[in-house]
Image: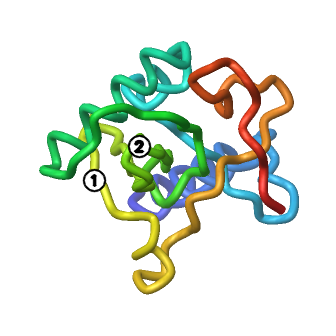
Amino acid sequence: MREVIATCLMLSLAACGSGSQAPAPANNQKIAVRSAEQDALHNLDTMNRDIGLKRAIQDSGMPCKRVTKSGYVQEYNTLSMWTASCADKRDWAIFVGPDGSAQVRPCQDLAQLKLPACVIAADPTGRTSRAQQGHPVQQSS
């Protein structure tokens, strides 16, 4: 009797896996999953994004009186990477975690730390790469 139950159980488990499955991403691309806190930063207008990034920089103990340029860089592991340039000519990388926490690093240190460069990502809508004055930020290739 145990053999019959075991056989039925194995057949039913095998049948569960035979249905259609979602296709894997093409070319082994990773699927980016962001939290509501990370998405909120993407949805801010330029002024409010600059204020949020300035506060993250200041809360980390770094100086920044005014953000003159900011933009989204890329996803890095589970962190959304942003960059901000301050009026004092300092450039910062801000890594925003899924819990809303932020880690700030000087852009000049990123190569040594083997982290992505502070280059604002190209965005055809211009939403994440606008300067404070409303002019597009120059993209580097």
Q: Are marks 1 and 2 in contact (CB under 8 Å)?
A: no
Q: Secondary structure at mark 1?
A: strand
> Can I make out residue 21 in this image?
no
For the residue carrying disc 1, how many other residues have a C-alpha within 10 Å: few (<14), some (14-19), or many (20+)?
some
**102 relative to 138 in the view: left or right:** left
In front: label 1 or label 2: 2
Spatial CA distance of label 1 from label 2 is 16 Å
Reply above or below: 137 against 3: above
Q: Which residue is the extreme one toward the bottom?
A: 112
Q: Secondary structure at mark 2?
A: strand
Residue 107 place in picture, x, y as percent: 45, 65
Q: Tag on residue 103?
A: 1
Residue 65 place in picture, x, y as percent: 28, 35
Q: How is the image coloured?
A: rainbow
**Residue at screen point 48% across, 60% down:** 77
Residue 103 place in picture, x, y as percent: 28, 53
Q: Tag on residue 65?
A: none
For the residue carrying disc 2, how many other residues have a C-alpha within 10 Å: few (<14), some (14-19), or many (20+)?
some
Reply above or below: 54 against 120: above
**50 relative to 20 in the view: left or right:** left
Label 2 is placed on what type of residue?
Cys
Residue 76 place in picture, x, y as percent: 51, 59
> Can I make out residue 66 in this image?
yes
Reply above or below: 97 against 136: below
**Residue at screen point 25% across, 32% down:** 55
Label 1 is placed on what type of residue?
Gln
Camera-side residue of 128 and 137 = 137
* Image quadrant containing the N terminus: bottom left
Q: Which residue is mark 2?
A: 86
**Residue at screen point 45% across, 23% down:** 49
Which tag, 1 or 2, sits closer to the chain's start?
A: 2
